Amino acid sequence: MTDLAQSLTSVRIPDLAGKAVLITGASTGIGAALARAFAAQGAKVAVHFNASRDPAEKLAEEIRATGGTVHLLQADVSKEGETERAVEESAKAFGHLDGLINNAGGMLGRLPTSAMTDEHYERVMDLNARSVLAATRAAHPWLKKQGGFIINTTSIAARNGGGNGAILYAAAKGFVSTITHGHAKEFVADGIRVNAVAPGVIATPFHERYTDADQLELQRKTIPMGFVGTPEHCVGAYLFLASPTLSGYITGQVIEVNGGQLMP
């Protein structure tokens, strides 16, 4: 555990204890860091994964070993019906649902527009955009029972158009940012706050898969703080947005976590 991760477990936000939170895409990267952090706050965490079963199971074991409550579930959120099933399973496992973190997503390959196919378009949009809408729609009846929160993971790419071959991913994240604003207004009467976090360049399996060392170094040089972030650098923004004590008058906002790479 890094020093930052250790520090995060020592911070106490009392109004998160006992909350039931579903985190999609929680087996690795930012999602896994969030699962650890919310569990450390005493929240009951539903850890969703798709293909990464081994990391998800190890994460669940880690959380249980520290006294946390975790429910592990598998679903391909890019497929119709699977996202809704994941939400229902999570809510029924805990008897309630207080928060949804729409974190699942991915680039699914760097392709120039000339090489894109309709199939690629559908895969990228289903994973990054449609899944957010489907999960939110399924979670809404549960969240409105007592009020709650939704936090969407968007990206710096939503504002700058993405890097080489990432245009479609960037457009999908633009959808996520925009629907965050719309849902914030639509659900405010139900006592549901909707916000988003937009990570910049973060050292996760995402970049291990899609960004080579030279590309990553070029991106690092554009960051005023001078280094690539870690998943733990993102955690504080999510905890802040989840806590009604800390952010109870905040909705419809996108918090940029990028080391100063983008200052809108």
Image: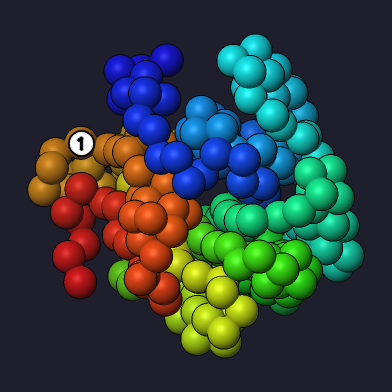
Query: Where 242 falls versus 232 (above or below)?
Result: below
Q: Residue at horizontal 55%, vertical 39%?
A: 17
Query: Where 98 falls versus 143 (above or below)?
Result: above
Query: Where 179 falls versus 98 (above or below)?
Result: below
Residue 87 visible in the picture: yes
**SS assignment at label 1:** loop
Q: Position of residue 35 (x, y in %)?
A: 57, 36
Q: Position of residue 163 (x, y in %)?
A: 37, 60
Query: Where 246 falls versus 126 (above or below)?
Result: above
**What number of labels is visible?**
1
The residue lying toward the viewer, choosing from 15 and 124, is: 15
Q: Residue at horizontal 43%, vertical 58%?
A: 244
Q: Residue at horizontal 13%, vertical 42%?
A: 225
Query: Is residue 218 left or right of 159 when viewed as pictured?
Result: left
Query: Is residue 57 left or right of 12 when viewed as pictured?
Result: right
Residue 55 in which image quadrant: top right
The residue lying toward the viewer, choosing from 28 and 23, is: 23
Residue 120 visible in the picture: no
Q: Which residue is mark 1?
A: 227
Q: Position of residue 227 (x, y in %)?
A: 20, 36
The residue lying toward the viewer, choosing from 68 and 4, is: 68
- Quarter holding the C terminus is bottom left
Residue placed farthest to the left in the image? 224
Disc 1 marks a residue whose amino acid type is Phe
**10 Å neighbourhood of mark 1: few (<14), some, or many (≥20)?**
some
Query: Is residue 5 left or right of 86 when viewed as pictured?
Result: left
Query: Is residue 81 left or right of 199 when viewed as pictured?
Result: right
